[in-house]
Amino acid sequence: MRAETIELGIADLAVPPGTHLCGFYRGSDERRNMVVPYVDTGLTAGDRCLCAVDEMELPAWEAEGSQLDIRSPRDIYLGRGEFAAAEMLGFWETWSSAALSGSYTVARVLGEMTWAVQEVIGPANLITYESELNRFAPRYHQVILCLYDLEKFGGALLMDVIRTHPKVLMGTTVVENLYHVPPDQLIHHWS
């Protein structure tokens, strides 16, 4: 049986399947307070988890077989040489479809976005990608959490990032994003 909500592991937060949300943090403690419970909860629930995270101290997670996949964000987002939103969406389509074709009932993704300010991909590419994830996420029984380091992203780009996410994780609260702009409107703005 499929759950009507997916527990995030942060406080008592849960979101509907197909949710794409962003989480903002400052410093390694705040980051760890999001990453570790999010992944721990997924592993305990038997979810298929993929974490594209920068180097950090991670627990020695016990996972069955291919339940947990931890990769560098550069391997995921730039593995084909350069970033292309369409190719990334194809990657997630393949991964989510495969993840849920077996015994897993929930796919759980954690994508750290620091790489986007370290590489020259252009804000239009990032915003297009994040916006298109809103069309993709509801197609599968999954939750996608994008992590943004407030110390590395400028205010103007962060405002556009916020506009791409229907929900925002702020500390121990998930809020409906009043500033969310649907993909067609946002992508038209960046075209």
Image: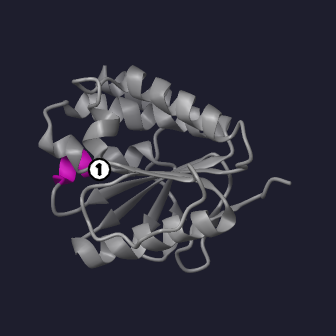
Residue 154 drawn in magenta: yes
> In the figure, 175 relative to 159: above or below?
below
Residue labelled with disc 1? 159
**Which SS type dominates the magenta stretch?**
helix
Q: Residue at x 13, y 44 (%)?
A: 118
Picture quadrant of residue 155: bottom left
Q: Which residue is drawn at the image coordinates 29% and 38% (left, top)?
A: 75
Tell me the magenta residue range. Answer: 153-158
Quadrant of residue 149 within the rendered picture:
bottom left
Closer to the camera, 34 or 172? 34
Residue 61 on the magenta segment: no
Q: Is residue 148 above or below residue 132?
A: below
Please provide percent x and percent y for residue 44: 63, 69
- Answer with left or right where residue 30 lies relative to residue 61: left
User: In terms of depth relative to the viewer, which is nearer, 122 or 86?
Assistant: 86
| Image quadrant occupied by the C terminus | top left
Residue 179 position in % (x across, y down):
43, 50
Q: Is residue 153 left or right of residue 76?
A: left
* Residue shown at the point (22%, 45%) measured from the top left: 115
- Quarter of the image that includes the N terminus: bottom right
Q: Amino acid at mark 1?
A: Met
Q: What element does badge 1 sit on? A: helix
Lateral position of residue 154 relative to residue 144, left or right: left
Residue drawn at x 32%, y 54% is 53
Residue extending furthest toward the front: 65
